[in-house]
Image (cartoon, grey):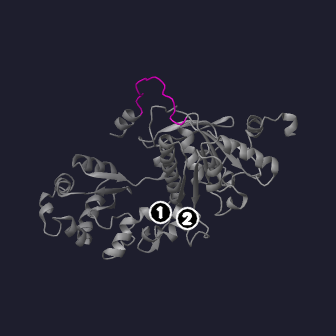
């Protein structure tokens, strides 16, 4: 089945005429660093926008996170591909003039600097939109502009502050979600907000300001636990690989060391699982297990039965039985196994004289190119941008 799935997913798509990218011609100027804002502008670049990344002399500090990507930082090449880089210090008159010239031509300005940093130099969103009424501005912060705004907002700190880490992990200990999920969420929320603002400008002719925070995004995801805590019997506890309110929805070990999560969502699926996987059709009507609520109540007895069943089977046989029973399942895979998953799509990207195969964009679109443009070196486009926007000569630059 895996081989057949791989062949289906990797089959060549029918040829079609090229489609222009939807944001072609738009200029995005970004004072960005680390992850949230660069991810948002990466998505805009994938849609055809020209993204000019303004960096400090030392560069975006994400450039130094690691050297895993053929000598470059994995974070940086992932979310800065296809951008232009210019180094400037907007506290210096000439560089401030360049930034002002960029903003005069920009459609979108996005920033994730420390709260208040740009207001002190007259580059805050409200001031910029008074000068440039069509400009869309996007501010990304850790906690918005309320009483917690001064808190530093690195990803794992926000996972903890939002309660996300408090419901993640095992009963013995909290756990960090294994990727920078709050930064990623803020970047995606910023992309949605910017596209919405551009759509509004299309109708009104006037830009507007949008703002997102890491905490707001994480809090939104915490709505169900929040409702249970404030209005119900209390938030769910940490369950590891087990759903707090659905059973069976958990991981089970096979005889050869495999691990499989199964999910039963309704009584039809439960009956099919009992007959097709367990070969115990009568179990579906057992009074302890004949509804989800009762299965949750008697989870310990239920899991004893399922642990024994899975523990008697090697992984391949367990998966074959689950398929015959039409039971939803997912293997608990390592990153190495994910890297060879039949559903994984990759696009090539040049890094120096080498090539990376990076994970393809999650949105499949008719304007897909099937490849990534490289991430820029520090100030790679500085001279060209200065010449274009200030109309100065190479000699004057020197």
Residue found farthest to the bottom: 233
Q: Quadrant of the C terminus?
A: top right
Q: Residue at x 25, y 60 (%)?
A: 309
**Which of 173/278 is in front?**
173
- Residue at image mark 1: 218
Q: Residue at x 36, y 73 (%)?
A: 235
**Which of 265/27 is in front?**
27
Q: CA distance from mark 1 to mark 2?
A: 13 Å
Q: Can you say whether 231 is above or below 269 in the image?
A: below
Residue 15 drawn in magenta = yes
x%, y% of residue 266? 21, 57
**Which of 198/286 is in front?**
198
Q: Residue at x 37, y 73 (%)?
A: 237
Q: Secondary structure at mark 1?
A: helix
Mark 2 closeness class: few <14, some 14–19, many ≥20 residues within 10 Å: some
Check residue 280 in the rendering and tell me which mark sits there, or answer none. none
Q: Can you say whether 237 is above or below 255 in the image?
A: below
x%, y% of residue 229? 36, 74
* Chief SS of the magenta region: loop
Q: Residue at x 68, y 34 (%)?
A: 353
Mark 1 closeness class: few <14, some 14–19, many ≥20 residues within 10 Å: many
**Which of 28/284 is in front?**
28
């Amino acid at each position: 089945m895996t081989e057949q799935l791989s062949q289906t997913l990797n089959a060549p798509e029918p040829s079609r005429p090229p489609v222009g990218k939807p944001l072609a011609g738009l200029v995005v100027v970004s004072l960005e660093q680390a992850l949230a804002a660069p991810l948002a502008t990466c998505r805009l670049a994938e849609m055809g926008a020209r993204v000019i990344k303004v960096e400090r002399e030392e560069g975006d500090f994400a450039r130094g996170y690691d050297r895993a990507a053929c000598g470059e930082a994995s974070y940086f090449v992932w979310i800065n591909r296809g951008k232009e880089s210019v180094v400037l210090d907007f506290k210096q008159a000439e560089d401030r003039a360049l930034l002002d010239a960029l903003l005069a031509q920009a459609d979108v300005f996005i920033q994730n600097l420390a709260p208040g940093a740009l207001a002190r130099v007259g580059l805050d969103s409200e001031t910029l939109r008074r000068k440039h009424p069509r400009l869309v501005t996007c501010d990304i912060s850790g906690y918005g502009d309320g009483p917690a705004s001064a808190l530093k907002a690195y990803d794992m700190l926000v996972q903890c502050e939002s309660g996300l880490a408090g419901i993640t992990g095992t009963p013995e200990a909290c756990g960090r979600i294994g990727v920078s999920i709050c930064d990623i969420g803020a970047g995606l929320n910023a992309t949605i907000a910017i596209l919405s603002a551009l759509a509004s400008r299309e109708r009104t002719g006037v830009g507007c300001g949008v703002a997102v925070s890491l905490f707001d995004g994480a809090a939104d995801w915490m709505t169900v636990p929040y409702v249970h805590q404030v209005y119900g019997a209390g938030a769910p506890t940490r369950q590891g690989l087990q759903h707090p309110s659905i059973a069976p929805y958990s991981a089970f070990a096979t005889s050869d060391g495999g691990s499989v999560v199964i999910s039963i969502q309704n009584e039809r699926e439960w009956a099919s699982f009992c007959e097709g996987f367990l070969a115990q059709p009568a179990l579906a009507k057992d009074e302890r297990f004949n509804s989800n609520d009762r299965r949750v109540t008697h989870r310990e007895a239920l899991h004893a039965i399922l642990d024994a069943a899975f523990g008697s089977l090697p992984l391949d046989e367990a998966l074959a039985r689950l398929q015959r029973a039409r039971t939803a399942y997912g293997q608990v895979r390592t990153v190495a196994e994910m890297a060879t998953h039949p559903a994984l799509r990759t696009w090539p990207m040049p890094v120096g004289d080498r090539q990376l195969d990076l994970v393809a964009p999650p949105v499949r679109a008719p304007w897909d190119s099937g490849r990534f443009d490289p991430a820029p070196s520090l100030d790679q486009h500085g001279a060209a941008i200065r010449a274009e926007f200030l109309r100065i000569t190479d000699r004057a630059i020197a």
